[in-house]
Amino acid sequence: MAQIKSKALFFTTSPRTPSKMIPEIQLLHESFEGAKWNNSSQSEFMDKLVMSDFFEGRSIPKDKPLSARDRITRAPKALGFVDLKPTIALTDAGRMLVYGNRPQEAFLRQLIKFQLPSPYHTEGAGMSGTFFVRPYLEIIRLVSELGKLTFDECKIFAMQLTDYRKYDSVKASILAFREEKEERKGQYKKLEDEKITEAIMGTYEDNIAQGKIETREAKEASLKKFITTKKSNLRDYADACFRYLRYTGLFVYSGHSIVVASERAAEVEYILANTERKPVFVDDETAYKAHLFSATEPMLYVDIKENIVDTVMKIGAYTKRELISKGIEELKDLRDELVKKQRDAVIDLQITELKSYSLYSEITEIFNDIHSGTLEFYDAPLMFEYNTWRAMTMLNGGSIKGNFKIDDIGQPLSTAQGNMADIECDYGDFALSVEVTLQGGQRQYDTEGEPVTRHYARLRQKTGKDTYCLFIAKRVNMATFEHFWGINQIPNMTAYGGKPRIIPLELEQFMQLVENSYTYHTTPTPADMRSFLQSTIDQLEGTTGAMEWKERIDRCVIEWLAA
């Protein structure tokens, strides 16, 4: 049982990407079902997880039990996918998430049941009566009634919605903020900082008055550090909230806002009209578990057959007579198939548009914003991955597959899973894996060095073709560069079919390649791409260090398609 100590709303931040908990829950269920959840099983779980092909990390954590608890007792337990008492068990809801055909539907059902307080989250000393809310449900209500919810509105105002009875005042504050934003055009950053500071000062007024402003990160307590830490926390919670809502498929991005997907509006309206707003079974763990673990409670719009029939008729060429005899699960399968066809058609249209270079200016503008840091994207790593896929597709000449997840309207949903390259390119007689990262410094080497080489080897083994790899970062840390310089020169590596061919590029260099292709007199071909890749690898010959190779790569970038 966790104790609530914060006076602001909070959301589960581990894992950040909801889909990444599915294989971990499956591993827990299939390897530890019936075992006690203790230090021993937690350590064993981490050992197995580190050896799995979906683990995203470089090494075994120092504190394995702590790392296991962070992964399992946060989202998987809090959302009712696993039960850890008296022994480890997969719940009915968890079974639908892990093994069902519609994990997003199972996830949505659990989100709108999540509540504060509960037998899993009790209020700490001096906190009694602060919380009485189903957080995700009320955020959904804000998005629906306000038409959109920006990231800043979420972190500043929505995090004050600790009791559903505060809903009207929170909504009014957001509307007032929007009016003030119009009145103070050109001063948004200042206004945003004023409002978030004001919100923190108001929420933690008692703590500040009593001098209780210590933070775990600081050796000495100071109001400035306290406010800075709370700002960071609010941003993390808003980020987690948006990610989890997006995974349900009911919401899409519009700039820095989250909005209800137009084709899913009826589902959102049904949830808001039919879901209990009050927390239930706060002091009854047995009853709460029965409620939380249910795979069918609460009822959703899609659980009503007539609604699914109507949906299928709208998106497919079917009559009611053709559909009415089908079971609801069969109808859902048909709906999912039709939605996939629509999504594929949208992506095909995007690819056609990209290959015409009509989106060149938009793509380069986004890269410029990422490079300079002048525009803060809601999910910068995802945008970097998605925009790089668009750029590689625009370069033409091959089949370019982005392994990031996309939603039903073709927007990026989450980054690629940890067991595959971010982007895989098939150029006929050779293949190319592309990895991108916004990580910098030593952490770049720690988190990217081994996975990049593993993904490269996997693609080569899968295709059986000569394979190259581009590693693209805003700035390539020298330790990372030296790692690739060294590994590329090791002969007879079976997994790589000889020497690896991994080419580190800084974003500015990749942008130069995109510009070169745009100004070239004709569309680049796979042979043009291979010429660049092989020339950078050939430049390894005779180098005495990574820095020399880096300088040679820069010349290859400048000269590509320049003739």
Image (tube, rainbow, N blue to C red):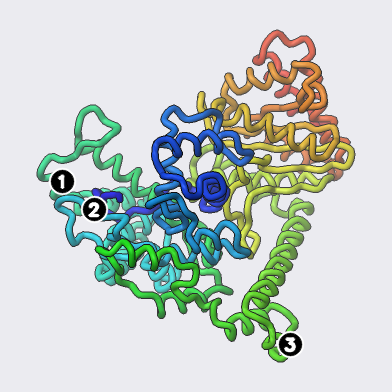
Residue matched to label 1: 207
Residue matched to label 2: 7
Residue 548: x and y, percent?
69, 13
Residue 225, disc: none
- The label nearer to you, 3 versus 1, is 3
Q: Amino acid at mark 1?
A: Asn
Compare marks 3 and 2 and give the one earlier in the sequence. 2
- Residue at left 56%, top 36%? 48
The answer to whether residue 196 is left or right of residue 328 is left
How far apart marks 3 and 2 lie (CA) works out to 54 Å
Q: Is residue 98 visible?
A: yes
The answer to whether residue 338 is left or right of residue 20 is right
How far apart marks 1 and 2 lie (CA) works out to 10 Å
Per the image, label 3 sits on a secondary structure element best described as: helix
Q: Nearer the viewer, residue 164 or 279?
A: 279
Mark 2 residue crowding within 10 angstroms, few (<14) / some (14–19) / many (20+): some
